[in-house]
Image: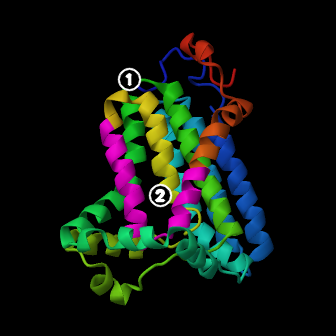
Amino acid sequence: MRGALPLDHPARGGAPLLLPVDRLLLGALAALAVVAAAVHPRPAPFLALYAALALVVAGAAWLAARSDLGDALHVFGPLLVIVGVYESVGFLVAASTPDRWDAALAALDGRAFGPLVAAWRGALGRPAWLTDLFSLFYVSYYVLPLAMAVRLYRQGRREELDELVFALQLTLLLTYLGYFLFPAAGPRVPAAAAEAVLGGGLASGAVRTFLRVCELNLLDAFPSGHTAVAVALLALGWRLLPGWRVALAILAAGIVGSTVYLSHHYAVDVAAGALVAAGALTASEPLRRALGAAPRARLAAGASPLS
């Protein structure tokens, strides 16, 4: 594979290849384990989950030094680990506090963005085709990071790929911190009324079913993770994948637009998500270096990322 470690790479067959993103995730998992033990009445399932995810991170790092397949698992593993983190966070947020910020966020929405929100949610009279289109944009959020990572991996651009994955994980972890600080469900429409209120066709119905089954975290409104990730990926992709700029701009705009149109988020969630993306992008590279990333010149010369 073009993206895999060369057979003569110093890390081949050596010690586990812990990358900065591995260390970031292991630190986050340890912190969540402490939170689970402190706030949840039944912490054992969470502790088991975080231990299993930590083993996935460490195991992938060990396998990366031994085979091309292991290297691929190591590269894409964080995109799977973060899903387990996301799905569990809502339960810990619910156990940590009875407070909910929905009333305050809705009031702030009305004061700051009232006419905009109304126009946003009622765009073009909400035709079925537009609701379907925004529904597809909404779930493209789950595919876009993987597509970008695969592209960089196939091009053999490992330093840029590590940069992308680290920035993405940091962005997501900062949004999860926001869930703890400002727990809110968002302006969700109950499942029984979703078809009548939101409209749309087969695509919208399929997306609503997917979200109802797969998204276990129901306290993920503030800040908007969809917005934070879309903005971060647009900024990163603009530099790393210039040939994708038009597509990335369209997808980012569609993802952000879908959040309010489909009543998943308040407008203030979107604004906060954009700020999270800006903060994550600013902090990402210094933090990645602090966690062990080698300068690009050393990597280009064939040095181990942790040597």
Q: Quadrant of the N terminus?
A: top left
> Across the whole image, how many numbered discs are drawn on residues?
2
Q: Amino acid at mark 1?
A: Arg
- The quadrant in which residue 175 appears is bottom right
Up the image or down, 43 lies above or below 273; here it is below
Residue 126 visible in this rendered orientation of the protein: no
Specify the segment rendered in magenta: 246-275
Up the image or down, 213 lies above or below 20; here it is below
Horizontal side, residue 183 vs residue 6: left or right: right
The disc, 1 or 2, on the residue closer to the chain's N-terminal end is: 1
Q: Which mark's residue is nearer the viewer, 1 or 2?
A: 2
Which of the numbered marks, if any, corresponds to residue 301? Answer: none
- Residue closer to the observer: 286 or 279: 279
- Rendered residue at 30%/63% (across/down): 134
Horizontal side, residue 58 vs residue 262: left or right: right
Q: Secondary structure at mark 2?
A: helix
- Rendered residue at 32%/47% (across/down): 250
Q: CA distance from mark 1 to mark 2?
A: 31 Å
Residue 30, given in percent of the width and then of the height, sits at: 74, 55
Residue 227, given in percent of the width and then of the height, sits at: 48, 55
Residue 89 visible in this rendered orientation of the protein: yes
Name the residue carrying label 2.
226
Up the image or down, 163 lies above or below 144; here it is above
> Dots 1 and 2: beta carbons under 8 Å?
no
Up the image or down, 152 lies above or below 299; here it is below
Q: Amino acid at mark 2?
A: His
Q: Furthest-bottom residue in view?
A: 192
Residue 109, given in percent of the width and then of the height, sits at: 54, 72
Predominant secondary structure in magenta?
helix
Within-10-Å neighbours for mark 1: few <14, some 14–19, many 20+: few
- The quadrant in which residue 259 appears is bottom left
